[in-house]
Image (cartoon, rainbow, N blue to C red):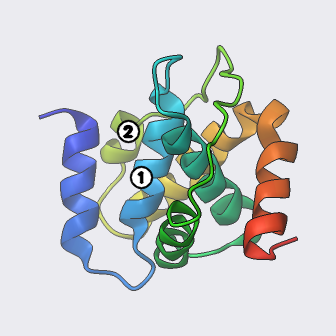
């Protein structure tokens, strides 16, 4: 089992109101994206990171926004992929003690990955404003 798989199992077992699992999925998707990735996957992951890191929106609400946007039928464009995708990984998060330390590590991982996508920020902010009314 990969560190990402173990981290997913951990976050799914939490049954938490915040739904940290969504943040783990979004951070991993953005960090491991390739030119072959589906644009919708990366755009939604970056939206999740933006909403979490900059707007302090919970993973549960991010999940709802993803479902709302999926029903629009929009054809998304793959954002530019940065060479560096952050200095933290799922393995680093998993190394943190379960509980608050690991939850803080998840948020730090999200911030680390989101920071690398600065060139795509305006696209994601515009998407959130236009489709979700979040400025």
Q: Name which quarter of the figure residue 17 lies in.
A: bottom left
Along the line of sight, which residue is nearer the eye, 67 or 6?
A: 67
Residue 43, disc: none
Count up the numbered dots.
2
Residue at (63, 42) in percent of width and height: 76
Q: Of the residues under marks 1 and 2, which one precedes in the sequence?
A: 1
Q: Residue 40, position in %: x, y?
A: 53, 43
Q: The residue tagged with tag 1: helix, strand or loop?
A: helix
Q: The residue tagged with tag 2: helix, strand or loop?
A: helix
Q: Which residue is mark 2?
A: 90
In this view, the residue farthest toward the front is: 73
| 10 Å crowding of disc 2: few (<14), some (14-19), many (20+) | many
In this view, the residue farthest toward the left is: 1
Residue at (88, 70) in percent of width and height: 135
Quarter of the image with the N terminus is: top left
Residue 17 position (above or below residue 67)? below
In this view, the residue farthest toward the bottom is: 17
Q: Residue 95, position in %: x, y?
A: 32, 43
Q: Residue 16, position in %: x, y?
A: 34, 81
Q: Is residue 127 left or right of residue 7?
A: right
Do the numbered discs 1 and 2 sit on residues whose CB atoms are within 8 Å? yes
| 10 Å crowding of disc 1: few (<14), some (14-19), many (20+) | many
Q: Is residue 31 left or right of residue 80?
A: left
Residue 30 position (above or below residue 110)? above
Q: Is residue 127 left or right of residue 17?
A: right
Residue at (83, 31) in percent of width and height: 119
Q: Residue 92, position in %: x, y?
A: 40, 37
Q: Nearer the viewer, mark 1 or mark 2?
A: 1
3D distance between C-alphas at marks 1 and 2: 8 Å
Residue 74 position (above or below residue 3)? below
Q: Which residue is mark 1?
A: 24
Residue 15 position (above or below residue 75)? below
């Amino acid at each position: 089992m990969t560190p990402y798989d173990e981290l997913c199992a951990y976050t799914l077992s939490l049954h938490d109101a915040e739904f940290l699992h969504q943040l783990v999925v979004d951070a991993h998707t953005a960090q491991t994206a390739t030119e072959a990735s589906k644009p919708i996957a990366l755009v939604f992951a970056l939206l999740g990171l933006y909403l979490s890191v900059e707007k302090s929106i919970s993973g549960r609400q991010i999940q709802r926004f993803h479902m709302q946007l999926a029903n629009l039928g929009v054809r998304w464009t793959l954002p530019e992929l940065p060479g560096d995708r952050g200095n933290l990984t799922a393995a680093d998060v998993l190394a943190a003690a379960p509980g608050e330390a690991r939850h803080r590590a998840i948020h730090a991982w999200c911030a680390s990955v989101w920071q690398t996508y600065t060139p795509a920020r305006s696209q994601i902010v515009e998407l959130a404003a236009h489709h979700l009314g979040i400025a």
